Image (spheres, rainbow, N blue to C red):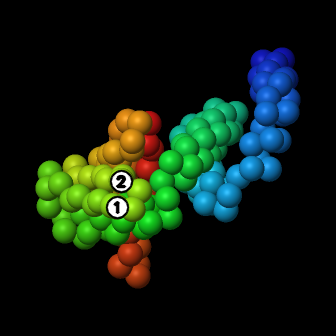
Amino acid sequence: MKARKMIIGTVCALAVSGCAQTTDRIRSMNWMEVAGTLGGAAIGGYAGAQFGGGLAQTMFTATSVMVGGGIGYIGARMMSQRDQALHNETTHKALASNTPGTPYHWNNPESGHSGMVRTMASYRRSDGTTCQQYRASVVFEDGVASGNGSACMQANGQWLAMNDSFN
């Protein structure tokens, strides 16, 4: 119980220490950045809730929400709406092809950004759902962001990204 209070106190202290800068950033966010943050937090929270139990599960979930939200914010801040649409279309094509290792490319001449998605492996979850792991990269003017992701086929035939981590 004492360790739990110490962890909660530490997390609260860290959260409060960045409030001034955080408030300014929140005021200047556009809707894409808000959507990226919330989407990343939701996916991260879902993924984190799959591990551990009790306090460990709470810690995994909280950490995953923060990391996912940060990744979602960074991704949305760097990619335009058209970049994201092209990335999503290409990801869905790669997943639908079910040809591991084949690269699928996209390019947005308006922003100068481009990217690549390559499926890595397919697997089945215990409930029978077909899922695939993939690797994606996006080329920006100041560098390359890449990450791994996984998506599962839904009952309606659409792929749902379970996680997508750009770093």
Q: How many marks?
A: 2
Query: Residue 19: image x %, image y %?
Result: 84, 33
Observer-nearest residue: 130 or 80? 80
The residue at the point 59 percent across, 55 percent down is: 36
Residue 142, image x and y in percent? 41, 36
Residue kind at label 2, given as amino acid type: Gly
Along the horizontal axis of the image, is 90 left or right of 161?
Answer: left
Q: What residue type is labelled 1?
A: Asn
Is residue 1 or residue 117 the one in the foreground?
117
Helix, strand or loop under label 1: strand
Across and down, in percent, residue 7 comes to 77, 23
Looking at the image, residue 70 lies above or below residue 122: above
Above/below status of 157 relative to 50? below
Task: Identify the image quadrant of the C terminus.
Answer: top left
**SS at mark 2?**
loop
Q: Identify residue for label 1.
A: 108
Packing grade of label 1 (10 A; few <14, some 14-19, many >=20) is some
Relative placement, left or right, of 2 versus 167 is: right
Judge whether residue 12 can be spotted in this image.
no
Q: Is 40 located above or below residue 8 in the figure?
A: below
User: Residue placed at 14% from the left, 61% from the top?
Assistant: 99
Is 14 in front, or is 128?
Answer: 14
In this picture, is 18 found above or below 144? above
Do the residues bearing badges 2 and 1 touch, measured as CB atoms within 8 Å?
yes
Q: Which residue lies furthest to the bottom in this view?
A: 156
Who's the residue at 74% across and 50% down the image?
Answer: 28
The residue that label 2 is drawn on is 112
Residue 20 in view here: yes
Circle 2 packing at 10 Å, graded few (<14), some (14-19), many (20+), is few
> How many angstroms separate mark 2 from mark 1 (CA)?
6 Å
Residue at 31%, 53% in the rendered image: 114
